[in-house]
Image (spheres, helix red, strand yellow):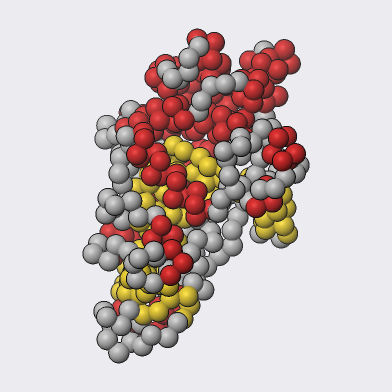
Amino acid sequence: MKWRELTAEGVSARPAHRREPTAEEPSSEPDHRAAAARVLQELGPCLFASLPRIDQRHKAGQYVQGLLAAEGRKTLRNIAAQLGGEAAQQSVHHFISGSSWEWEPVRQSLGRSAERLVGPQAWVVRSTLIPRSGAQAAGVARHFLPHLGRTAKAQQALGAWLTSERAAVPVDWRLVLPRSWRDDPGRRARANLPADVKVSTAGEYVRDSVPGAVGSWALPRLPVVLDVPQLCPYELVSGRDGTGRPLIMSVCPDTVLTLDEAVLPGAGTQEMPAWRIVDSMKRLWHRTKVPGPGGGGVEGMLAAVPVKAWVADCAGDGPPFLRALLLAEWSAADRRPTWFWLTEATDVPPAHLLRLTRLSGTVTREFTEVSERVGMRDFAGRSFQGWHRHMTLASVAHLAMATAAARHRAAAHGPLSGVA
């Protein structure tokens, strides 16, 4: 994890580099939206095939069209204004918050389309904070928002993204329910929170999200990059799924570890924060290129240090510690490491692991440039089901926008692999 604060937009271990528009890029936002609307007409029948009724499939397409066309925040009122004004608002509200359609089959179809578009190199699980004004929306709790300089009410969402260096599409979403929601039946009822939805930590949600999508949805088994705050090293143990795929998680600079004396004889076994471990192992530093503020590479440093982390609480019959590789990266202009990652994939070359961690920057960029524009954080209702349905259809809108942009670039610069 970068030595930085959590923002309302979420967490990322890489700067959100923006693609500079070329002369061939769409000349205006309405033109881009029109292209996305045409993509939706093409993909919609497949994406919404799981909805049992014709009217539900029609309304799903209308809702996504509203997300693409509405100006400003994509509230139910603004979306309804694209579909017939106030007369449509009650119908839109019922379709999102009161209807019976299931969002998971739509996400499964979304994942297959996203796989074709993105040509993914990894799953990236990213945390996003969604500020809320009321206290009754599902999962709302107080979080520190650095851009406000204070704590405020917000929802914490975890998105599982299929990601490559050039594109990222969110496929699944989980809403973290803090402990304040555990013993308040009235609050749970007002948010229509199902009885089988339990309070869990962010780590438990992470362990369920990608394995669930991969296992039951037949999506690709790829390396997993966890860019979620406040995860502990034992999440690497509990996140094992038996496939041997790399699992890499961001960690804070103060994460307590020890040097692995089996790999580094004589290094000692003193517990130290991650930043101090890296500082003590200058002989393991190597020059590299790191992302610069303009999107290009700048001179930097990489350290890959064999370490051990105490995981006795979840080790079961295994050893009370795990052997891992601590990755740290920083630009030459910085005086100390700025990004820290931990992985058990000690047999994978550090340069390859580093490329995987940089995919979190792709997600940050795509969230800013695409997801924000289609209202990913704009749902103002309080129901658990409504939030999930909105996030699902906003992800479909994201796919439509990303596909339209990829097709435009392919037409301007020649065909690109993976363009749906």
Question: Compared to 98, does 335 lie above or below?
Answer: below
Spot occupied by residue 222 in the image (x, y as percentages of width and height): 31, 46
Q: In the depicted view, which residue is nearer to us: 332 or 418?
A: 418
Is residue 227 found left or right of 356 in the rendered image?
right
Spot occupied by residue 27 in the image (x, y as percentages of width and height): 49, 30
Q: Residue at x 59, y 58 (%)?
A: 6
Spot occupied by residue 379 in the image (x, y as percentages of width and height): 64, 34
Location of residue 83 (image quadrant)? top right
Location of residue 147 (image quadrant)? bottom right
Q: In the depicted view, which residue is nearer to us: 18 or 248?
A: 248
Residue with the most extreme front position = 317
Question: Compared to 165, does 39 lie above or below?
Answer: above
Q: Residue at x 35, y 40 (%)?
A: 214
Q: How many marks?
A: 0
Spot occupied by residue 154 in the image (x, y as percentages of width and height): 67, 48
Q: Residue at x 50, y 61 (%)?
A: 231
Asked if residue 238 can be seen in this view, the reply is yes
User: Which quadrant of the figure contains the C terminus?
Assistant: top left
Asked if residue 289 can be seen in this view, the reply is no
Question: Compared to 407, does 184 lie above or below?
Answer: below
Q: In the depicted view, which residue is nearer to us: 354 or 17?
A: 354
Q: Residue at x 49, y 21 (%)?
A: 37
Question: Compared to 32, does 356 lie above or below?
Answer: below
